[in-house]
Amino acid sequence: MQNKSLQERLLQALGFELLAILLCTPLFSWIMGTSWMRMGALAVANSVIAVLWNMIFNAMFDRFRRRHALLKGMGIGAIWRAVHAVLFEGGLLLITVPLVAWWLGIGFVAAVLLDLGLLLFFLPYTYAYHWAYDALREKARSG
């Protein structure tokens, strides 16, 4: 599905983040024993950070690949996709763990565990959301 407009891509990304916030807030509020408002504010902050980090990181990663002529003329291969994912998630962890620890008043280890829990949530969520979005989009276009 390469023919999505910028407006549609923005709508898809906003829907992804909004649904994630709506799902994560009660779940992680219950797990951490904190209020929905407190966890919701943290979820929104993490969402904004993740979107900004995504744009910054991808620009830096693409510039690095161009500068070093990595995989020139070929798409990004499986190894570079894995490197990209690990570096992206590692950078996001470095940014969000201190915020989570401070906001919830918990230790560093607890904040890392919470962030790892979020990562475990987002792996299937990302797959399911984008699969469902594309399936519903295709159904709407054909029907």
Image: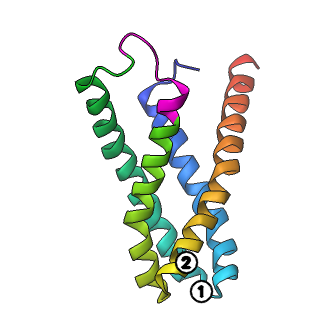
Can you identify the residue that label 1 sits on?
35
Q: Are marks 2 and 1 in contact (CB under 8 Å)?
A: yes
Q: Residues within 10 Å of mark 2 (few under 14, many from 20)?
A: many
Label placed on residue 39? 2
- The residue located at (65%, 50%) in the rendering is 123
Which residue is nearer to you in this view: 25 or 79?
79
Magenta stretch, residue numbers:
72-81
Residue 72 placement (x, y as % from top left)? 35, 14
| Three-letter code, disc 1 | Ser
Quadrant of the image occupied by residue 120: bottom right
Q: Is residue 107 visible?
A: yes
Where disc 1 sits, the SS reads: loop
Looking at the rendering, in which quadrant would you find the N terminus? Answer: top right
Looking at the figure, which quarter contains the C terminus? top right
Residue lying furthest top in this view?
Answer: 73
Q: Residue furthest left?
A: 67
Name the residue at 56% across, 56% down.
Answer: 18
Disc 1 crowd, CA 10 A, few/some/many (<14, 14-19, 20+): few
Write the residue at 52% across / 72% down.
112
Whether residue 8 is visible: no
Q: Residue type at mark 2: give it.
A: Met
Q: How many marks?
A: 2
What residue is shown at x 39% (from left), y 64% (from top)? 94
Asked if 96 appears above or below 13 in the picture, the reply is below
